[in-house]
Image (spheres, rainbow, N blue to C red):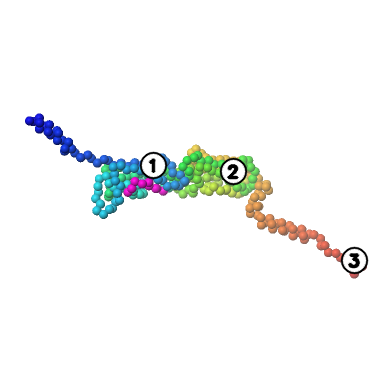
Amino acid sequence: MLSLLLLAGVLALPLFAVPARAATPTVMIVSPADGAVFGNGTPMIVRFLVSDFSLVQPGRVGQVAAPNEGHLRVFVDGALARLVVQVEPIVLPLSSGPHTIRLQLVDDVGNALSPDVSTSVRVVATHGPAGGVPTIRIVSPKLFERTGHGMYVSFQITNFTLVEPHGQPNAPSEGHLQLLLDGSVLEELVQVEPAFLVSLPDGDHDLTMRLVNNDDTPLSPDVSATTNFHVTASTSATLPLVLNGGVLFLEVFIVTILILRRRKEPANTSIAPRDEL
């Protein structure tokens, strides 16, 4: 009889099984990948997936906290940036430099789940292109060119964007341009347009143009170009200065010469002979 009772108890165990525990919620960032670079100042788009958790609008009338229900918080560099209640792409405008993006699931009243359910990714934003190797080329002056005391400097850059430095973090393919004369920084450029140098001393000079980061440090590896030119006080070298700024003076000078020549010409008046008087 005892054995029959034990057998009946074993058979009845499945009828009183403990209910299964709720699955653990998860959140996963699908994109961007860790270390991704967002170029040309474009906003970053975050795509994510949530499992075993329902995203709902917080603050509903009569809302009661329920397990595996709540919303998503988006943090940028530790600061709350967005509250998300739907699984949809998140658009985040970012300033230049490195950033950490963190997604965290919270309950209906905004408390973190226990244990914490979150994920993060590190990205970099830049106003420059997202890829490619920066280069610079000096267009003028040409190597060993002879010029006057005033000279235009023109250049070409690729895969690099010039921006005004204002203390922002360094970012790939973004910064400004240093113009060095004989090894000393003469000017810093933030626009792709010719620079005009004046009062250049006579003799040979080395001109270097170097791409640098927002904090004035050279790129790694260094990206620069150098040329050599000779300054002389020849008329041909200073002619552009006359054409650019002295046209009116030149016209006045020519008119003055013509007037002086006219005054020196002998009078063309005829005098009648005395016999005719």
Instruction: Indicate the amino acid at tag 3.
Output: Pro
Q: Is residue 251 above or below residue 116?
A: below
Residue at 12% in and 33% down:
8
User: Mark on residue 151?
Assistant: none
Residue at mark 1 to residue at mark 3: CA–CA distance? 112 Å
> In the rendered structure, does residue 86 fall within the stretch colored magenta?
yes
User: Mark on residue 139?
Assistant: 2
Q: Which residue is mark 1?
A: 31
Quadrant in the picture for the C terminus: bottom right
Residue at mark 2 to residue at mark 3: CA–CA distance? 75 Å
**Which stretch is magenta?**
85-93
Instruction: Indicate the amino acid at tag 2.
Output: Val
Residue at 43% in and 42% down:
37
Q: Which residue is mark 3?
A: 273
| The image quarter in which residue 3 lies | top left
Mark closest to the chain's N terminus, 1 or 3? 1
Mark closest to the chain's N terminus, 1 or 2? 1
